[in-house]
Image (spheres, rainbow, N blue to C red):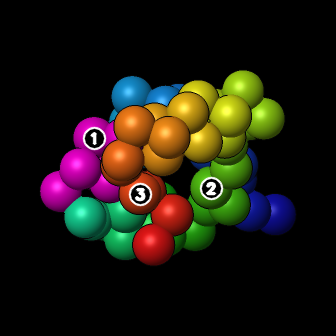
Amino acid sequence: MRSIVVLDCDLMSSFAKIDRIDLLEALFPDAQLVITASVYNELLKTKEYGFDFFG
């Protein structure tokens, strides 16, 4: 059974700012990485301000 890692907005945005979201997968190679709906919505808000973390 794979473990689940729930990522918060601070962590996601920090790695996104340096364009290295891929490092999260390297840090947790055997885990399923997930975000909550509220984190997703917060990241969408940042996109309105010109940051594109979704590639």
Q: Nearer the viewer, residue 37 or 29?
A: 37
Q: Nearer the viewer, mark 3 or mark 2?
A: 3
Q: Are marks 1 and 2 in contact (CB under 8 Å)?
A: no
- Calculate the distance from the C-alpha at mark 1 to the C-alpha at mark 2: 16 Å
Which circle marks residue 33 in the picture?
A: 2
Please provide percent x and percent y for residue 27: 36, 59
In the rendered structure, the answer to whether residue 3 lies left or right of residue 54 reads right
Q: Earlier in the sequence, mark 1 or mark 2?
A: 1
Marks 3 and 2 close (CB-CB < 8 Å): no
**Highlighted range, magenta:** 13-18
Structural crowding at the residue carrying mark 1, measured as other residues with C-alpha within 10 Å and reported as few (<14), some (14–19) or many (≥20): few
Query: At which x and y percent is residue 48?
Result: 50, 40
Name the residue type under label 3.
Asp
Question: At x 51% / y 63%, what residue is drawn?
Answer: 54
Q: Where 9 sits versus 48, above or below?
A: above
Amino acid type at circle 1 is: Ser
Q: Position of residue 6 (x, y in %)?
A: 63, 38
Quadrant placement of the C terminus: bottom left
Q: Is residue 20 left or right of residue 55?
A: left
Name the quadrant of the N terminus. bottom right
The mark found on residue 35 in the picture is none
Q: Secondary structure at mark 1?
A: helix
Q: Tag 2 or tag 3, which sits nearer the N-term?
A: 2
Q: Secondary structure at mark 3?
A: loop
Q: Nearer the viewer's eye, disc 1 or disc 2? A: 1
Q: Mark 3 to mark 1: distance in Å?
A: 13 Å
Which secondary structure type mostly characterizes the magenta part of the structure?
Answer: helix
Q: Residue at x 36, y 47 (%)?
A: 50
Q: Is residue 37 above or below residue 20?
A: above
The label on residue 52 is: 3
Tag 1 residue = 14
